[in-house]
Image (cartoon, rainbow, N blue to C red):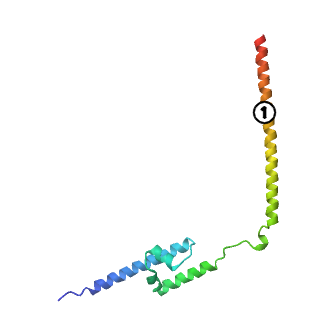
Amino acid sequence: MRADNSQHIIEAARRRSEYTRSKAIQALRSIDAAGEPVTFDAVAKQAGISRSWLYGQPDLRAEVERLRAAHRRAPASPVPARQRTSDASLLRRLEAANTRVRQLTEENRRLRDQLANALGEQRADRITRDQTRGQR
């Protein structure tokens, strides 16, 4: 007569179920904490379990559906229409930026010319000074 091993098989199945359940709960928590959309597929993939098993767990199914609904309700905080920038305003800002770029370009040109003149005068003074020293 064979020994009755059914108790061991039942215990192994219970441990496997608890382990699977803990993986699903952990996946739910981490997906929610990351701010990602909670879906059956995402939870199943992250936990390494089947979606059909997840659908078959009433409490986990309810939690996925609750978190999914809460994520959908969260506003994406769009800018209200009255606070959006109008096309005319954007064009004015672009024109102002272009005007400022032209001003800065002209200022840079003037400063380069001044620097070139100053360096030229400095060189001329040095040459003159060297020539007068050589004549003494």
Outermost bottom residue: 1
Q: Position of residue 34 (x, y in %)?
A: 55, 70
Quadrant occupied by the N terminus? bottom left
In the image, residue 112 above or below residue 131? below
Quadrant occupied by the C terminus? top right
Foreground pick, 92 / 30: 92
In the image, residue 41 above or below residue 120? below
Foreground pick, 119 / 28: 119
Give left or right: position of 44 versus 85: left
Q: Based on the displayed image, in which of its 4 quarters is residue 81 positioned?
A: bottom right
Measuring 79% from the left and 55% from the top, which residue is drawn there? 97
Measuring 32% from the left and 83% from the top, which residue is drawn there? 11
Q: Based on the displayed image, in which of its 4 quarters is residue 124 positioned?
A: top right
Measuring 55% from the left and 83% from the top, which residue is drawn there? 65
Quick one: SS at disc 1?
helix
Outermost top residue: 136
Q: Position of residue 30 (x, y in %)?
A: 51, 72
In the image, residue 95 above or below residue 121? below
Question: Which residue, given by chain and number where applicable, does mark 1 sit on?
Answer: 116
Three-letter code, disc 1? Ala
Q: Based on the displayed image, in which of its 4 quarters is residue 85 positioned?
A: bottom right
